[in-house]
């Protein structure tokens, strides 16, 4: 978990820009916990298309025109902030919020916040990695069970009122590979071990001979293909970086064990989607579980919708239950560190992309 230091401060203005308005009681709780901090709540939530364009560096004037309009009072409040907690940032904020020193993202993905631009202005950015790791890991394991136990067939038989014996596969003894051993990857690994599977992990920073307590064997990026050849399922939980874009292209998909189940709860850019559709049609990939796609919302005419053995979901593998509480716990912990000149948790390195 990344940490860094910030200058000690005695008085700060903090604005919570979480999309949902906060209750007065919630703001009162923050004031009681941090009497030296002035808190305000200005909900701000951009359309998905604009958020996606920012994350991919494809912002146009047409997209910017879809940004929510702030009142002058709301803009003044944000302009006076030292600290923001946000999913999105209003266009040009780096130029009209001169006091801003730290942004706490409400999710693990931070591309829409344009971290390189924040760094250029000396603004710290921390993400919420780990806050949603448990529900996402549960989702990944749930989908794998759905595939291997062939639940879809049983559901179709129920709809047809047909009583017919149909049995799925044994999960015990299978080998599951995890690409990206961050908070999500580790939570997937721990849950997979409970099913008595062999868990292999792949981490960019791993060196030959390294081990990890959450996986049976650890591979470096250079050993990825060797790992993939052993797996019955591969879970992608890596962030988007220059190295991970199209990491699973046609050549890499061909190196999978035939019939492998591919699960992506990381970023849509990791997979060459046209190559994936072809691999599903040939049976090289036995099933694909995608909670993320390259373009979101996924266009109605995308070939992904009708690809064989495709399990699609609209980027919804997390859960609302417990999320706000975990997020506020992280934010308050980091705010205490900020005030005390201690290292912050989950600091984003724009050069690495996470």
Image (cartoon, grey):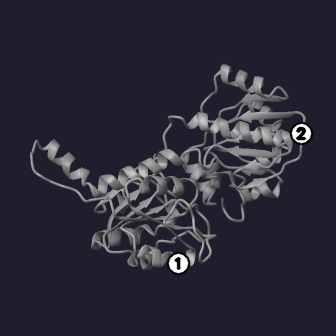
Confirm whether residue 314 shows in the render: no
**Closer to us: 124 or 307:** 124
Q: Please name the residue shown 83% across and 54% down the image.
A: 121
Relative vertical location of residue 105 with respect to residue 59 in this rendering, above or below = above
Q: Position of residue 86 (x, y in %)?
A: 67, 41
Q: Which residue is mark 2?
A: 9
Q: Quadrant of residue 240?
A: bottom right
Q: How many marks?
A: 2
The foreground one among 17 and 352 is: 352
When asked about the image quadrant of residue 281, the answer is bottom left
Q: Work out how far the residue at label 2 is from the one at label 1, CA to CA, in angstroms.
A: 46 Å
Q: Is residue 247 above or below residue 264?
A: below
Q: Residue at x 78, y 38 (%)?
A: 336
Label 1 Cα crowd, 10 Å radius (few <14 / some 14-19 / many 20+):
some
Quadrant where the N terminus lies? bottom right
Residue at 62% in and 28% down: 21
Circle on res. 223: 1
| Callout 1 secondary element | helix
Q: Looking at the image, can residue 263 be seen?
A: yes
Which quarter of the rendered picture does the C terminus lie within? Answer: bottom right
């Amino acid at each position: 978990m990344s940490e860094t230091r910030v200058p000690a401060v005695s008085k700060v203005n903090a604005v919570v820009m979480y999309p949902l308005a906060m209750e007065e009681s919630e703001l009162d709780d923050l004031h009681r916990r941090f009497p030296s901090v002035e808190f305000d709540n200005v909900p701000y939530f951009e359309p998905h298309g604009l958020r996606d364009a920012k994350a991919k560096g494809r912002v146009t004037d047409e997209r910017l025109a879809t940004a929510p309009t702030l009142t002058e009072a709301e803009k003044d409040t944000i302009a006076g902030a030292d600290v923001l907690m946000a999913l999105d940032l209003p266009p040009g904020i780096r130029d009209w919020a001169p006091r801003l020193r730290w942004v706490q993202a409400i999710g693990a993905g931070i591309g829409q916040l344009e971290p390189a631009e924040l760094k250029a202005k000396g603004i710290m950015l921390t993400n919420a990695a780990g806050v949603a790791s448990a529900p996402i890991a549960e989702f990944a394991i749930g989908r794998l069970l759905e595939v291997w136990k062939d639940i879809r067939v049983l559901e179709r038989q129920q709809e047809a009122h047909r009583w017919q014996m149909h049995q799925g596969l044994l999960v015990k003894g299978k080998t599951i590979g995890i690409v990206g051993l961050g908070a999500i990857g580790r939570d997937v690994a721990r849950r997979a071990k409970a099913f008595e599977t062999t868990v292999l992990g792949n981490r960019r920073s791993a060196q030959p001979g390294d081990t990890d307590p959450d996986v049976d064997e650890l591979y470096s990026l250079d050993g990825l293909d060797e790992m993939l050849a052993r797996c019955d399922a591969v879970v992608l939980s890596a962030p988007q970086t220059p190295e991970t874009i199209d990491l699973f292209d046609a050549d890499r998909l061909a190196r999978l064990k035939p019939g492998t189940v591919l699960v992506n709860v990381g970023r849509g850019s990791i997979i060459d989607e046209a190559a994936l559709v072809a691999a599903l049609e040939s049976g090289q990939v036995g099933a694909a579980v995608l909670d993320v796609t390259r373009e979101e919302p996924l266009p109605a005419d995308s070939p992904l919708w009708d690809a064989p053995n495709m399990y699609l979901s609209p980027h919804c593998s997390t859960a609302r239950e417990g999320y706000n509480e975990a997020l506020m716990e992280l934010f308050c912990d980091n705010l205490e560190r900020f005030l005390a000149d201690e290292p912050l948790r989950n600091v984003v390195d724009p050069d690495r992309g996470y």
